[in-house]
Image (tube, helix red, strand yellow):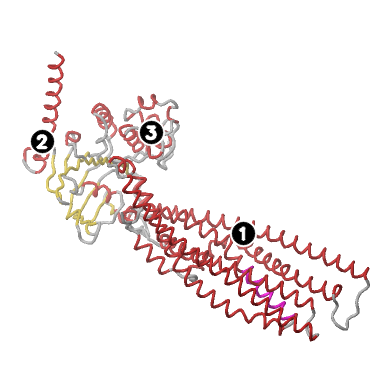
Amino acid sequence: MANPWDSAADEIDGKASIYDRRLAGRLLRFLAPYKKETVLSVLLLAAISLLEIAGPYLTKVAIDTYVKPASGAAAPLPAAASRGLLLLAVAYVAVLIGSFGLRYIQSNMMAMVGQRAMRDLRLRIFRHLGSLTPSYYDQRPVGQILTRVTQDVSVLNELFAQGVVAVLGDLFILFGIVGAMLLLDWRLALVTLTTVPLLAVATAIFRAKVRVSYRRVRTRLARINGFLQEHLQGLDVLKFFNAERREARKFDAANADHYEAHVRNISHYAVFYPVVEVIGALSIALILWYGGGGILAGTVTFGVVVAFIQYAERFYQPVRDLSEKFNMFQAAMVASERIFELLDTEPAIPEPPAPQSIGRLQGAVEFDRVWFAYQDEEWVLRDVSFRVQPGEKVAIVGATGAGKTTIANLLCRFYEFQQGAIRVDGVDLRAVESRALRRQIGLVLQDVFLFSGSVRENVAFGDRARGGDAVERALAEVGGTRLAARFEHGLDEQVGERGAWLSMGERQILAFARALHYDPAILILDEATSSVDVETERMIQTALHRLLEGRTSLVIAHRLSTILDADRILVMHRGELREQGTHAELLAKGGIYARLYELQYRRQAAAAHAASASVGADVGASG
């Protein structure tokens, strides 16, 4: 099964580079609150680099002063030589301990900075996701968005904790080693550094190869994540159709692609590291050749040659570290581009620059020649106009795809309509802040979503402050007292992920209680009683008669028996408002509504007749 975001992932990976100044600048802003720790970490790395350089120099001093003095220099007395070597040995150990201690402090400090910066970034992403409208999520798989918040942010954590500042430390050591070699003997230093062009060529080839292979790894990992997310959500369907083996083969193919891409990426490192070792060995060979000749000629001391060998070995360690960090930087650029692409996404519905205050709504709703399409000009609503008076109960009916739910979505400002106007209490919705509007609207959907937590937490989910017994009252209003009494822990009973431990009817009762606890001025019911039994529906309908008093309500329903008492019924057909009136008026017209009602009545009568016949047959058989 192909994933719809494969091409998008390839495009993002294709655009990413090892370094992008604009992206890097935006990333560094997340370090701004911790600049003191960052600056201190850089200073610690500078001190560490000095200590790293000091070790070989101490070795040079020990050899040239106490072990094998340069020609023409007086040899020290044995006692003085012993004391001098002991002091240098202590100094060498002190350098190692100091380097270890400073590196521990620096690593710990940057790890904390990285975690804090990522905490800030995750919070910013989560808040931004909450500001986006549903149209954004319609176009992107959930797995892709989760990857942004988790995996991509973790990649940036590695960059901050081990990348940005650590690279400076490696550069400090490289330049320090080159400076020390030039000071000790510039001719031998130049000979030693003749291998650097070879290293540059090898690194350039490595970077080009790794960049391509890394993109392949990322895109194939995105496919695996998307495949898993989709199939875990549809596990029941997968099992019902006995498709486990077939889908397992598809996953095996995607997994094999990821494996091959990863192996190819590893193979580049497996070649590059030995090449660096060979180049390092070549530089040491040059030191032995030229430095040995210098010792014989008396132009270079033995201690200088030993120090150069140690410096050469230490010179290539930062090079290997920088090569490892290349992959980290590549990952960080890709991850940051993905993250900033998300953060730069503006909500599809802009907030007004000077929002108009609406206070507590009376509940008047008006659609004035509204046109809406989810894509281009594939109109879902066509020139729809109607008015709902405060406190009026209006039902919206029609065939699937007629535009009923779209009306609710537009009223809640989940989507932006293209033409016309929608008003509440005479105020255009586009002049009202979306949050202020949604504080006035209660919404109960057919597919109820409950969050992990207790019954009480889900009923009191809205941001309105209520008294201590408000949850109990809301449940009682919708007939949920018996439901609460059934739970072992009462209202503190856990509902499970998405309310998995409750039946569909129980979840809908809690959704009713949640909407009523929110105390909305306008209540929207979208097929809200379609999954409850007849007794529960009758109980809820009785409660709604009492609770909808004083509130404007829009009831979207397929089952026409649930909206017979509506003050007015709007009949939608292919995105247009074709009929409106009371139940009796619409039946008298003999139009679309009358045909819908007659069709449902026949189905119900046929079902009842079949059930009666089945019962009669059972009775006859038993007799």
Helix, strand, or loop for circle 2? helix
Q: Badge 1: few (under 14), some or many (20 or more) residues near its Cα, within 10 Å?
A: many
Name which residue lies at 45% across and 27% down.
Answer: 489
Which stretch appears magenta?
A: 168-183
- The numbered disc on residue 501 is 3
Of callouts 3 and 2, the N-terminal one = 3
Q: Closer to the N terminus: mark 1 or mark 2?
A: 1
Q: Residue at x 86, y 82 (%)?
A: 71
Could you tell me residue 254's position as x and y percent? 37, 56
Residue linked to disc 2? 584
Magenta portion: prevailing SS class: helix
Q: Position of residue 552 (x, y in %)?
A: 26, 40
In the displayed structure, 14 sits above or below 194; it is above
Asked if residue 174 is among those painted magenta in the image, a careful observer would answer yes
For label 1, the residue is 110
Above or below, 140 against 590 in this view is: below
State how far apart marks 1 and 2 are (Cα). Answer: 73 Å
